[in-house]
Image (cartoon, grey):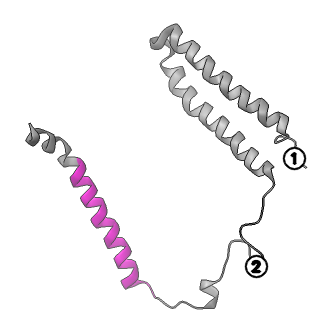
Amino acid sequence: MIGNVVAEYLPILLFLAVAFVVSAAAVGLSFIVAKQKPNKEKNSAYECGFEAFGDARARFDVRFYLVAILFIIFDIAVAFLFPWAISLGDIGEVGFWSMMIFLGVLAVGFVYEWKKGAIEWE
């Protein structure tokens, strides 16, 4: 019984071992082959083009978070609507009304975003 279980998971374990060896070899070779000459310019911040100033824990406007929530609402809707539409013929009326309830919950989230002013950006 246990031998059967191990035999079923052997390809997965083999795949993980090969992935670990290949990734470790790639990282190791990059340290061996690449030139390691750090200087001030390489170690400086490059995201914005200027040196960081102020505290990184500054407060953000809540609208940034509301836009993120809005993105998640539409992203989740798309992620669940595609498989639902493909299998709509098989899941029947219960599946249809379950998705309508789900879309209703997403609509409540969208109305909340709208009322908070996340759509009107100044």
Q: Is 70 displayed left or right of 16 in the figure?
A: right
- Foreground pick, 94 / 15: 94
Q: Is residue 28 above or below residue 106?
A: below
Q: Which residues are magenta?
A: 12-35
Earlier in the chain: of badge 2 and badge 1, it is 2
Image quadrant assignment for residue 111: top right
Q: Is 94 displayed left or right of 109 in the figure?
A: left
Quadrant of image for the N terminus: top left
Position of residue 54 measured from the top left corner of the image (x, y, whole percent): 78, 76
Position of residue 41 measured from the top left corner of the image (x, y, whole percent): 64, 87
Q: Amino acid at mark 2?
A: Phe
Question: How many labels, in total?
Answer: 2
Q: Give the residue at x 50% y 21%.
A: 86
| Secondary structure found at label 2 | loop
Q: Which residue is tagged 2? A: 50
Q: Is 30 displayed left or right of 21 in the figure?
A: right
Main SS category, magenta section: helix
- Foreground pick, 66 / 55: 55
- Foreground pick, 78 / 112: 112
Few, some or many residues within 10 Å of mark 2 (<14, 14–19, 20+):
few
Few, some or many residues within 10 Å of mark 1 (<14, 14–19, 20+):
few
Position of residue 110 measured from the top left corner of the image (x, y, whole percent): 74, 32
Q: Give the residue at x 36% y 84%.
A: 32
Position of residue 20 measured from the top left corner of the image (x, y, whole percent): 30, 63
**Magenta residue check for 16:** yes
- Foreground pick, 116 / 15: 116
Q: Amino acid at mark 1?
A: Trp
| Secondary structure found at label 1 | loop
Q: Which mark is residue 121?
A: 1
